[in-house]
Image (tube, grey):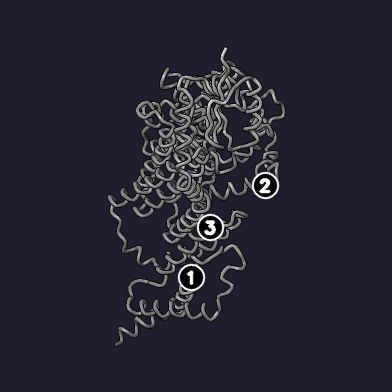
Amino acid sequence: MNLFLHKLRRAFSFERTACRLILSWCCFVFTTLGGKGSFTQLSWMQETELAQVALTSLGFFLLFSLVAALTSKINTDALFLLFSSTGCIAYWCIFAPAKNREWFLLSAILVYSLFLVYCIRALSNVWDYVKMHTPVAIALAALAGLACFGVIALIGCLRYKTFASPNFDFGIWCNMFHNMKETGLAMVTCERDTLLSHFAVHISPVYYLLLPFYCLFPSPLTLQIGQAAVLAAGVIPVFLLARHFKLSNPQTVLCTALYAFFPVITTGCSFDLHENCFLPLFLLLTFYFYEIKKPIPMYVCAILVLSVKEDAAIYLLFFALFLLVSEKKYLHGSLLAAMAVGYFLLCGYLLETTGTGMMSNRYENLIYNADDGLMGAIKTALVNPGYLLTQLFADKDLKWDKVMYFVYMLLPLGMLPFATKKPSRWLLVAPMLINLLTMYPYQPRIGFQYHFGVAAFLIYAMLKNLPEIEAPNVRRTLLSVAAAACLCSYLITAYPLLDARLRNWSQNHEKFDEMEAFLEETVPEDASVAASTFLLPHLADRDEIFEVYYHKNKPDVEYVVLDARYVDDYEKFYKAYTKLGYTVVDRLDDRIVVLKQPSE
């Protein structure tokens, strides 16, 4: 009897009772989520009587009270509150309003973090009994990596299959890999509307690592799947780094999941394949081999980083500065800095003398004399650092893209990249400046590929800082905030990308299959073609393919393939080419029109 009374007193303590009241209300809210309409409208569920709210919540309260009275070792109220609040917040994030979505995200992260931090603290005795053996941790980390791979691969493949992948930047890779397979050279015709090596635009020999797989499976889908595999492989060095820093198995799995579901990793593939996808894997491997004191593999991985693109040398330079200033590793820091600067200068010389030049215009807001190129931006940083502050979060369109970029990059990691007693370690956060100081509108947007390298630095900083947080409750709280922010951010940014592609494919896959078959049957494989941007990747497996928009109505191609779904462009190019004597060979209702060059 005394034991039962003790259980009752514990079950009806003030804290447990208050938690159960909130839990009961959360459960009522959760049961109404499937109602008609949208929660974003003020009118939603307004017909519900307050008496119904009270009675339903009371029913849940009595049920959970009975469960609490029968169990004494586990705080079931906190456990159920964790599940119910997660369900609510997940639903709200998935169906978040398109308008002011960013501000909704901040609200969701704030509220969910409060719930999550409380529940984790209230269940602290439970975590002490949870034992996760290493094989289980490896399996869970692998599952996180597979989930990352599956989502990115699906988004990429469905973009291509639904004719949503444009020439820039997917058709150019399809054509380049066709030529690499045939000749071994990275030649492409649809990037600058002439036969040109891609390396005259960007020096990216890393693409040859995907070539063997493309030769085995010569399809644009191979490129999309390859990018997903490369990004998902980043979980391996994250797992290894976490083990090296002696994080517990649950913390190791959580850090691996933070990488796998780091929203910027998935959303960075919103516009198909880019060489930047190799940066997280190669940079994290470089960091790992440095930490375990394996210099030869570290330098091999550093070379792989440089092979990604000419500006990848900047990331290596940041790491070299970190080694020099924070780690006091003067030999390795100096060698890596020399490699980075030397390679960057070499690439700049090659691009200026034999290519199309360095793309320094993205930092023209920092360059006083246009003839100075990127050196002008460096000069500005050295002589006028105050000016940099005027550009850090500035946006010429007066938007909040840079502020939200900061939020998306750091909140899903619980601000842990800053959680260190060594200010010099903040050099690992400094690569964010690459995307914050430019006025090029796409760099501070997470829907593009420019933050893959930055993400690797932030993940490394988080892993390096975690062991220094000695208080278990503080570490647990920060990781809880990271998990809450990562989940909310992922559901509000990455999930809609997948959902939109799945719905479009499921509703229209027959039409897309017809378009694919029509192109294969109508346009000969060896013909030269000018095509609309969203049709071009499906015709790029040939020697000569041009985007009709940039081809300027030149009558030097055998076939012109126009996308009639976009009426204005279609009519303009249709009139231009019919005036040149091109005639309609075939058409697929109101979607595709194929014209052929007049015979001699």
Question: Image quadrant of residue 7?
Answer: bottom left
Left or right, 199 with respect to 292, comes to: right
Residue 95 is tagged as 3
Question: Image quadrant of residue 215?
Answer: top left
Work out whether 565 lies above or below 58: above
Work out whether 138 lies above or below 73: above
| Label 2 CA crowd tier, 10 Å (few <14, some 14–19, many 20+) | few
> Disc 3 vs disc 2: Cβ atoms closer than 8 Å?
no
Q: Is residue 335 visible?
A: no
**Mark 3 is on which residue type?**
Phe
Q: Residue furthest top?
A: 600
> Disc 1 vs disc 3: Cβ atoms closer than 8 Å?
no
Looking at the image, which residue is at 70% across and 41% down?
Answer: 396
Residue 399 is tagged as 2
Image coordinates of residue 27 in percent, x first then y, are: 46, 71
Image coordinates of residue 178 in percent, x first then y, are: 44, 24
Work out whether 157 lies above or below 116: above
Nearer to us of marks 3 and 2 is 3
**Residue holding disc 1:** 26
Work out whether 40 lies above or below 467: below
Could you give the CA–CA distance between mark 3 and mark 2, rounded to whole angstroms?
24 Å
Q: Give the camera-side residue of 77 and 93.
A: 93
Residue 363 is tagged as none
**Mark 1 is on which residue type?**
Cys
